[in-house]
Image (cartoon, rainbow, N blue to C red):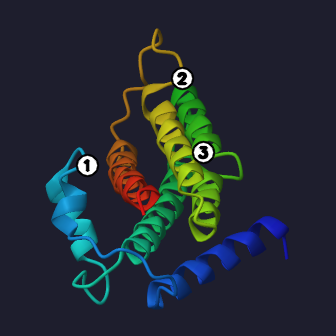
Amino acid sequence: MDPWKASLISCLLLTFLLFAESTSTSKVLDVNIICKEVENPSFCSKILNSKPGGTKGADLVSLGNYTIGVVFGNITNTIKLIKSLIAHSGKDPKAKSHYKECLSLIGGESGSLGEIIDTQKRFEARDYYGVSTSASSVIANIEYCISGEDPEDPPYPDKSNLPRYARFIEQVVDIILVISIFLKQE
């Protein structure tokens, strides 16, 4: 098996195991306290309150693991969407080029997928400063895909669902960043 695929499978399995039960003792914090620190509090509340088993008594570590899993799943779905957009871009070279660039920024080891895997590893190691760095890279790659790397160049006029998928990921990563800030304070 390809080592990259094995790493993805291992990360996914580990994420689900971490959902089941958090083995660390971490501060329990009300979801509303976390969500008032993010850009979109109602989105945050909806995401965190969708955690299997609920959030009553959920500690920061279990909430962090949950949100990392949400991002991982959504990045995986976004990669599938991008591959489909590439396949259906037909004779539009600008579209095909844009989507291929997004695939490199979001998929693979150096893209958002690799960065969320790194975020999970740093989270497990309780390296919450590293979590902030890796999670911020996820957002940077997403923004480069949607807006372009050069502010002088106009962004690609994307009418697909990709901008919506990207925005969802950014908002969930924002929650991870806030959780990591609270964990740094422990």
Please tell me which residue is depicted at 26% across the width and 85% down the height of the picture: 57
Percent x, y for residue 170?
Answer: 38, 47
Give the residue pinned by disc 1: 38
Q: Quadrant of the C terminus?
A: bottom left
Q: Nearer the viewer, residue 182 or 2?
A: 182
Q: Secondary structure at mark 3?
A: helix
Q: Is 151 left, or right, of 159 in this rendering?
A: right
Q: Which mark is residue 149?
A: 2
Percent x, y for residue 56?
Answer: 21, 84
Please tell me which residue is depicted at 38% across the width and 34% down the height of the picture: 158
Callout 3 amino acid: Leu
Q: CA distance from mark 2 to mark 3?
A: 14 Å
Q: Residues within 10 Å of mark 3 (few under 14, many from 20)?
A: many
Give the residue pinned by disc 3: 103
Q: Is residue 4 above or below residue 57?
A: above
Q: Earlier in the sequence, mark 3 or mark 1?
A: 1
In the image as oriented, which residue stretches furthest toward the top? 152
Percent x, y for residue 67?
Answer: 40, 67
Callout 2 amino acid: Glu
Front tag of 1 and 2: 1
Q: Residues within 10 Å of mark 2 (few under 14, many from 20)?
A: some
Q: Is 113 left, or right, of 55 in this rendering?
A: right
